[in-house]
Image (cartoon, rainbow, N blue to C red):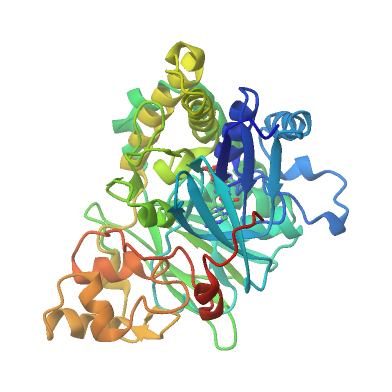
Amino acid sequence: MTDRPHLAVIGAGPAGLAATLAAAAHGVRVTLIDAAPEAGGQFYRQPASDLGARRPEALHHQWRTWERLRDGMRKHADFVRHLTDHHVWLVERGPRAGFTLRALLGPEQTDPAEVHADAVLLATGGYEKVLPFPGWTLPGVLTAGGAQAMLKGSLAVSGRTAVVAGTGPLLLPVATGLAAAGVEVAALVESADPLGFVRRSRALLAEPAKVVEGAGYAARLLRHRVPTLARHTVVEAHGTERLEAVTVAALDRAGRTRPGTGRRIPCDTLAVGHGMLPHTDLAETLGCRLDGVAVHVDAEQRTDVPGVWAAGETTGIGGAVLSLAEGHIAGRSAAARLHGTEPDPRAWAAAARTRTRLRAFFAALDGVYAPPAHWTSLITDDTVVCRCEEVTGGAVREAVEELGAGDARTVKLLTRAGMGWCQGRVCGPAVAGLAGCALTPSRRPFARPVPLGVLARAGEADGDA
Ligand SMILES: Cc1cc2nc3c(=O)[nH]c(=O)nc-3n(C[C@H](O)[C@H](O)[C@H](O)COP(=O)(O)OP(=O)(O)OC[C@H]3O[C@@H](n4cnc5c(N)ncnc54)[C@H](O)[C@@H]3O)c2cc1C
């Protein structure tokens, strides 16, 4: 076993699992590392084992694919080591060759662990974008993906009456999932213009499986009598101790709220999301080139840093099936190159075709789903924008309009927005929007906060986790 080359895969979602199986099947020893306690990532998030879920498949699509991945992991168990609860904060080139991965262990994230490998495959997925509006910090307001994660991971819902709002395809499984779990979904509020689907119908219809999936969600929304408000947005969440209602308003063609259209919807849960962004922190620490906000890869899913591959939503948002295809290609390519051979792309031709089709589909979808063009006008001066450091919209505007800040970094230095625990992951898009600049990578030295004691001892241990 030890004479096999060693690949470290970070992220046990669809991309990381597909990559692990492809590499292990082609003579590579794999260490699969993930911060979560179970494999599956966001899409195949599993209920905590002590909950004793009898039918976890009821909360999932494509359960057969998950079973195939899970069985594949068992089959290749001799060559795959799965490290759960490992939060990787840094990947660096080893002193001689290969790479050293530095992680923090368990929920406390205070004890360190190290993994050494010949090559690295980044499959760290994406995270949700949430744009602020008055009342968004009230208890009862959570991200759409957060509501979905609670449902899948804890079999729990956060209230009895929910509004699901924002923009993007993720709102559909969230609304139907909550409704199926017995929550009254008072409205699905989507800011996208349905005409956008008509304008891009050619590109969208080229992927019939996705059209069928969309129709399935529409049927479920009808069955659960979920009212859908297209070209609408939440303008305010109301409540004193916790969420009691939201006000939604219609949007005009320019993306401004139409005066006089506001209506109040009582609810105790607001699940809100405005799309997804790729996780690029580890790629940034390695110095990988980014295309906009995603990791740049070539046809083999290689980054521009030798020995580093990337697959799945870290390279661009496109759903679980695209992540599986990219992971498979990356795993095959890494296996061939680690054995010192030139990979033959014919070996992954089917996955490459899926990748091409789904990238085109999601590019078209990206042009349809969008937050309201004038979403920053909803942020009042006393709306908290940076939750960690409690920086308001007024403070950010003052930094921009009176102190001359023209980018998120200068706003951060003047207001502390983005200096807190989340390191600007949540407030970054809002600060960039208020500053009128593009969202740019932050180039943090580490992917997550690290205790000083761990930093001081980094490099002392030479054993593997
Ligand atoms: C909260 C949330 C809920 C979602 N729910 C749905 C849904 O219901 N239906 C749907 O169609 N799509 C959903 N999506 C989108 C879907 O999950 C993705 O399309 C798909 O999972 C992408 O696969 P991936 O392998 O690229 O990444 P992911 O599945 O996101 O897996 C990435 C993995 O990397 C791990 N990771 C990241 N950084 C580190 C690190 N530094 N150290 C260690 N581990 C790390 C994470 O723990 C995660 O397990 C959701 C996305 C999110 C964020």
Whether residue 192 is visible, yes or no, is yes
Please determine whether, in this image, residue 158 is positioned above or below residue 116.
below
Residue at the spot 54% in from the left edge and 73% down from the top edge: 457
Is 295 positioned to the left or the right of 396 in the image?
right
User: Which residue sits at x=40%, y=27%?
Assistant: 300
Please tell me which residue is depicted at 46% across the width and 51% down the height of the picture.
94
Q: Which residue is located at x 74 percent, y 35 percent?
A: 70
- 181 shown above or below 430: above
Q: Nearer the viewer, residue 151 or 343?
A: 343
Q: Is residue 244 above or below residue 44?
A: below
Say which of 264 and 307 sits in front.
307
Q: Quadrant of residue 401?
A: bottom left
In percent of width and height, residue 146 lies at 59, 61
In the figure, 206 relative to 177: above or below? above
Residue 172, how many percent across, how many down? 55, 46
Q: Quadrant of the N terminus?
A: top right
Instruction: Give how far across and how far down residue 183 sits, in percent.
Output: 70, 59
Q: How many numbered discs?
A: 0
Please state if 72 lies on the left or on the right of 460 as rendered.
right
Q: Quadrant of the C terminus?
A: bottom right
- In the image, residue 9 lies at what x, y percent? 56, 43
Residue 85 occupies quadrant: bottom right
Q: Nearer the viewer, residue 284 or 233?
A: 284
In this view of the protein, can residue 226 be seen by the observer? Answer: no
